[in-house]
Image (cartoon, rainbow, N blue to C red):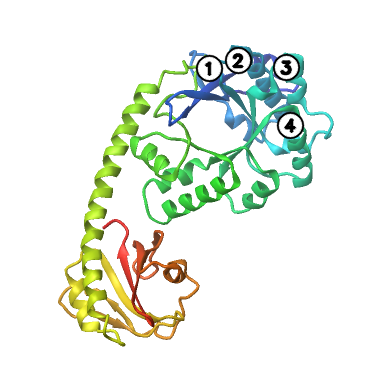
Amino acid sequence: MQNVVFSTSENVQEEWDSIKPFFQPIVEVSSGRVTGYEALARYVNSNGEAVSAGHLFTDEGISTEDKRRLDRLVREKAVRRAHELPDQTRMTLNISPQWLTATTTDALPTLDMLHRHKVDPSRIVIELIELNGDLDSLCRAVKLYREAGVRIAIDDFGAGFSQIDRVIALEPDIIKLDMRLFQQGAQGGMAESAVESLVVFCAKSGAVIVCEGVETEEEFFFGLRCGARHMQGFLFSQATEDFADCHAFSQQVAELRARFFAAQKEKAQKARASYQHLMQAVESIQQHHKMLDIVDVKFVSQSLRAINGVIRFYAADSTGEQLTVNYARPMEGDVWIEDARFKGYNWSWRAYFYQLFAGESRVLSQEYLDIETSTPCKTLSVQLNDNTILLIDVEASS
């Protein structure tokens, strides 16, 4: 990468002429349409190549004032081009909170730019990067943007725990997941669970979820599983000098959706078949226990032995207190492994337990990560009689 060299503040404006905004499309997964474009600073080097100018904003050799001037220069160049936006699309402008909190609350340069260039504020999204700075000043600035009709986005959500309180305070319209966390989540494991939890939080806040940095089909599919409504990344396009056609990626997205649907359908069919075998075994267990006041552990273990994906089983009374030890499926052999650590624990606070008493005889829980095995699993709670509940932990993917 060829860097820009700034000698003095006096001649910096001349050197900035080669820095301009490029625009990366943001794609809606339901329609395949481009609904927005993020303006990104690019430096055109002597070979005519456009490279990211992001490093300039972390260069210690450039003064804070020059960085602020450069930030506003690139932003104004982007605003000038807002009139070229295709219909029903928006332009996203990145702003660091440190620039906002350094200004007076009644003078926001970006709003002045929109007014000066006669740009409809509703076509603009202000994307807050690096949620630092004074929160009270930031909230006042966001309030002014909203009053003008501008939408607010938060970038890199999930990159730092301190962002949670700021999301609550700012109530953004759009939340973009941290690219590194998202890509890591697509590989599975704890990061996947973390991303899914963040998406649930975002959805409950009423914000639109955008996954950026989407480079592969697997990452696109992971975004769909998470419930993201929009995607952005090299899978579709890098930032370009001109606005991409709104329908440029419609066919690509349609094909991706179709492959995702086929894969999820096959997975769901396999899971359903597996759960059917489990439910048949459970029905047999319930029938066997109709006339019993105690848990027939031997019968339960025999009934569940042939069911793939069963992790463990145990029983509790109607108050939620665990009556038996845990019986974990053996790695090899036929003898279930007994674990007495949890006998006497009370599970009445778990949703899948108390839901039984709302009229259901069987309740399958939401998916969660099993602490003992680090396996995504679900718990099936089964009412054996008026005072006995059987609980079966089973792999969620089975």
Q: CA distance from mark 1 to mark 2?
A: 8 Å
Residue with the mark numbered 3? 11
Residue closer to the observer: 41 or 266: 266
Q: Secondary structure at mark 1?
A: loop
Question: Do labels 3 and 1 touch, CB within 8 Å?
Answer: no
Q: Which mark is residue 45?
A: 1
Using a 10 Å C-alpha cutoff, classify the residue at mark 4 as few (fewer than 14 neighbours), some (14 to 19) or many (20 or more): many
Which one is earlier in the sequence, the residue at label 3 or at label 4?
Answer: 3
Q: Nearer the viewer, mark 2 or mark 3?
A: 2
Q: Which mark is residue 145?
A: 4
Amino acid on which disc 1 is placed: Asn
Which one is earlier in the sequence, the residue at label 3 or at label 1?
Answer: 3
Amino acid on which disc 3 is placed: Asn
Q: Which mark is residue 18?
A: 2
Q: Is residue 50 above or below residue 349?
A: above
Q: CA distance from mark 4 to mark 1?
A: 35 Å
Amino acid on which disc 2 is placed: Ser
